[in-house]
Image: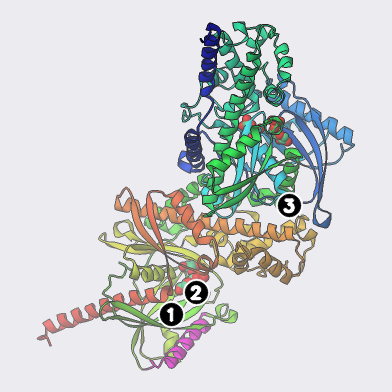
Amino acid sequence: MVTAVAQRLLSQRKQVDDTLAHFSLNRDQLRVVRDKMRVELERGLRKDSHSSASVKMLPAFVFQTPDGTERGKYLALDLGGTNFRVLVVKIRSGIRKSVRMYNKIYAIPHEIMQGTGEELFDHIVHCISDFLDYMGMKNTRLPLGFTFSFPCRQTGIDKGSLVSWTKGFKATDCEDHDVVDMLRDAIKRRNEFDLDIVAVVNDTVGTMMTCAYEDSKCEIGLIAGTGSNVCYMEDMRNIETVEGDEGQMCVNTEWGGFGENGCIEDIRTKFDREVDEGSLNSGKQRFEKMTSGMYLGEIVRQILIDLTKRGLLFRGRITEPLKTRGIFETKFLSQIERFISTYTLIIALMHLQSLGSTCDDSIIVKEVCGAVSHRAAQLCGAGMAAIVEKIRENRGLEHLEITVGVDGTLYKLHPHFSRVLKDTVRDLAPKCTVSFVLSEDGSGKGAALITAVARRYCGGAQQQYLYSMRFSDETLLEIMSRFRRELEKGLSQDTNPTATVKMLPTFVRSIPDGTEKGDFIALDLGGSNFRILRVKVSHEKKQTVQMETEIYDTPEDIIHGSGTRLFDHVAECLGDFMEKHKIKDKKLPVGFTFSFPCAQTKLDEGILLTWTKRFKASGVEGMDVVKLLNKAIKKRGVRFTDIMAVVNDTVGTMMTCGFDDHRCEVGIIIGTGTNACYMEEMRHIELVEGDEGRMCINTEWGAFGDDGMLEDIRTDFDRDIDRGSLNPGKQLFEKMVSGMYMGELVRLILVKMAREGLLFEGRITPELLTKGKFETKHISAIEKSKEGLSKAKEILARLGVEPSADDCIAVQHVCAIVSFRSASLVAATLAAILTRLKDNKHVPRLKTTVGIDGSLYKMHPQYARRLHKTVRRLVPECDVRFLLSESGSGKGAAMVTAWAYRLADQTRSQTFNSGMSSVTPI
Ligand code: 0WK
Ligand code: 0WK
Ligand code: BGC
Ligand code: BGC
C-alpha cells in the first residue's frame, strides 16, 4: 500500500525530474546544435551575411602560432576574466628557449566596470603604473600586448574597436571605440610613463598562443570561464571579410552570441530567459548565458526559486538571499558537485533553513547544479565539434588531429565540466581526435608571444608604411570608379587630349571568327623576350594553328641606342629567322606586336607616343614604327615582307585567346609592363568615325595616375621608384603593379627596415643598396608556400646579408604585401572595364572572358588567384573567365594580319573589279 507520503514524494520527484528534463539534451538535439553552430560560423565568415550573423567571426590578425623563434621582453595586460593582471614576460628562443613571467593581479571594482570608459582606462593605467613602480621599470618603454576579453572588430594587430561589452562590464563611451586608442589616451592623461602598444588580442587567442608554444598542434583556443568563447586558425580564403587568401588567420568566433537570432529557442528554457532578462545585456550572448560561469549559478538560483515556489524545495519558503541576483555563484556548483558536504555551507549562506529541509533538498540542489553544468558542458562540446569538423573539412582530411588550448575557472574548477565537454566532442566529431591542454600561464604569455611576432614583422611605425599598402574593398571600389571616369575621359573627343588613360583605337574590329587562314610572320617586341614567329593557320577539318618561334636578344645598348639601330636589329633578326626557317623567298604578311603606346589611324600604322618599360631608343617617339621597320627591312634587303598590321600585345593576347574562346573581349598583360584592351562600342569612340559595331581599344592603363589621381595611395617607395626610372612622372600605375618595378619596390622597403634595425640586425650591404638587385622573380620564389623561406635565405645571402629565420619571414611578408597590392590594383581597374562592358550591353549580368599574359601573372604562385578573387568580390555581377594565353600574342597578331590581309585582298579585288567593270571581268 503506497502511503500518501510516498505518493507525494513520488510526484515531487517527477515534478523535479520534469523540470530538469529540459536541461538534458539527447544526442540528436546536440547534433542539431552542432549543425546550427556550423551554419552560424559560415554566416559570420561570409561577406554577404557577416553583418547580420550572431556568431561574429572576428578576424584577429594573428597569422600563425608560435614557432619558437620569438624572443624579447614584453609587458602584457589581461583584462576581462575574473582577474585583471599586469605581467612582464621574458621570452628566450633557441636552445635556452623559455618564458619567464611575473604578474600582479588587480581588482576591477564594480563601479569601475560600470562607470565611464575614461575611469576604466585610468584605472587600468593606474594599475600599470603601480606594477612598473613595483618592478622598477618606469623608465623602460617596453612593447605591450593587451589581452582584452571582449568582442573587438580588428583591422590590424594593434587596432580593435569594441563591438559590445559582455559579462559584468558596461563602462560608457567605449563601444565602437578603439580600445588601443583609449588605453593610449589614458597613458597620455597620466603622463608618467610611455608604452609601445603593439597588439590587442582576445583571451581565447592569447590562450591558443600560450598552449601552442608547447604544442604545435594547438590551433584552437577555448575559454570556459566567466565568459565562454572560442578562436581557431581559419584559412584566409574562407575569411571573406579580410583581403588575401593565402595562409591562415586566427578568427575569434565570439560564439557567446550564438542564438541571438533565435536559432536555439527550442532548447532555451524559461530559466534561461529569466537570466537573460535580468542581465546587463539582455537579448545578447544567449549561448554564453547557457554555458559560462557568469550565469550558471544564476540559472540554478532561478530553478531553485521555481522549485521552492512550487513547494518542491526548502518547504516552499523563499528567503531574501535566495531572491538576490548573483548570490548563487557558479563556484558553488563546482563545490556542491565535488563535495556534497559544501551544501550545508552554501545553504547557510542563503539563510535557507535546511533544518526544515529534508535530505532531499541537498540531493535536489545537487541535481539542479549537475543538470545546469552538464548542459553547459554538452553545449560547449557541440559547439567545439562544429569547429573541429570545419577545420577537418578545410583541410580535406579523413581524420583530423588537433589540440585545443583551454583556460577559464569553470573548466579548471568544475569537477565534471571538462570530461563532459570532451565526451561530447568525441561523440559529435568522431573523425577528429581532439586533445585539450590546460593553459597554465594564462593568456598574458600568449599576448606577449603575439607581441613578439607583431614586433618582429612590423613594430608600430613600420607597420604604417607597410600597412598603407593594403587596400580595403572600399578603397578598391573608389579606385575602380576613378579609373572608370578616366576611361570615359579618354574616349571622348574633348577630354582625350588631357586624359592620362589614352584609350587608343586599334582598328581591330572583332575577335577571330574561325575563318582566318594563311601563313604569317609575327614579330613580338616589348615584353621580356623579343620573339619572331611563323604562324600557319589552316582549315583542314577544323581551324588549326602551327607556330615556329625564335627568341632574340634585345641588348641594353640597342634598346637605349638610336631608333635606327633598334629597327635594324629587328630587321636583322627577321632576316636571320627567315634564313633559319627557309622562307627567305616566301612573301609572307607580317603582323607586328609592338608593346608600347601607339596612336593608330589604321591597322598598319603606329605612331609611338612614348617609350615605356626598359626601352628608350632615340628618334622613335612621334614616329610611325611600321615605316621605321619597313625602312630597316628594306635596308637589310629582307624581301617579300609586308607589314599588314601593328598591334599592341594586349590586343594580340585578346586575339590569341579569342581564337579558343569567342567570348574573349578583354586582353590584359601583367608582365614587365601592364596594360589592358577591350572591345568598345564604336558609338562611344569619338576619335574614330562610325557608330556601327565595335573596335578594340588599347587603354594604356599604365599611365593611370600620371595626373596625380593616385597620389593618396602612392607611397614614398613608389615615388623613389619613379624618380629612379627612365620615364619619371609617367606610367605611375604601371610602376605600382608591374614586374619591371616590383622587385625594386621590395628592395627599397627592405633597405628602410634594415636602416630602422628591424631587419638583418641593421646591417646594409652594398648589394642590398644596388638598384635592380632584388628582382621580381625573387618575389615569386619567396612567396612559394613550401620552399619560400629557404629561397628567401638563398636570395638574401646572394645580397650579402646573413638573414635570421625571422628576417626571412619578414621579407616573405613584405613580398606578399607588395605583390598583393599589385593584384588588388589590377583587379580594381579590370573591374572598371568589366562594368563598362556590362553597361555597354545593357545586361544585368555580364558573362565574358579575359585573355591574360605576362610573366608576373604566370610565374607568381598566388597572383592569379588573388586577382580572380578580388575581381569577383568587386564586381559580383560579372561572370568572368580568366584565360591564360599559352602561345603568346604572336598568334593573335597573325589573326589580325589574316583579317588585314583579307581586307586588303577584298579592296584589291574591288579596285580591280571596279577597274575591270570598266574592263570585262577575268
Ligand atoms: C585566464 C586568462 C584570461 C581569461 C581567463 C578566463 O589569462 O585571459 O580571460 O582565464 O577565465 P575566467 O577568469 O573568466 O574564468
Ligand atoms: C607574352 C606576349 C608578349 C607580351 C608579353 C608580356 O607574347 O606580347 O609582351 O607576354 O609579358 P612579359 O614578357 O613582359 O612578362
Ligand atoms: C567575450 C569574449 C571572451 C569570453 C571569454 C565573452 O564574454 O565576448 O571576447 O573571449 O567572454 O572571456
Ligand atoms: C606599354 C603597353 C604594353 C604593356 C605590357 C606597357 O608599358 O605601355 O603598351 O601593353 O606595357 O607589355
**Residue 303 in the image: above or below residue 477:** above
Secondary structure state at the residue bearing disc 3: helix
Residue at numbered disc 1 = 523
Provide the residue span drawn in magenta. Answer: 563-584
Which callout, 3 or 2, points at the residue further toward the start of the chain? 3
- Tell me where residue 794 appears, x and y as whole percent: 70, 69
Label 1 sits on what residue type? Answer: Leu
- Closer to us: 432 or 281: 432
Q: Main secondary structure of the magenta part?
A: helix
**Residue farthest along the left direction in this orientation:** 920
Label 3 sits on what residue type? Answer: Arg
**Foreground: disc 1 or disc 3:** 3
Residue 456's disc is: 3
**Residue 811 in the image: above or below residue 557:** above
The residue at 53%/27% (across/down) is: 24
Q: Residues within 10 Å of mark 2 (few under 14, many from 20)?
A: many
Q: Residues within 10 Å of mark 1 (few under 14, many from 20)?
A: many
Secondary structure state at the residue bearing disc 1: strand
User: For disc 2, does the CB lie below 8 Å from ligand 2?
Assistant: yes
Indicate the quadrant where residue 654 lies.
bottom left
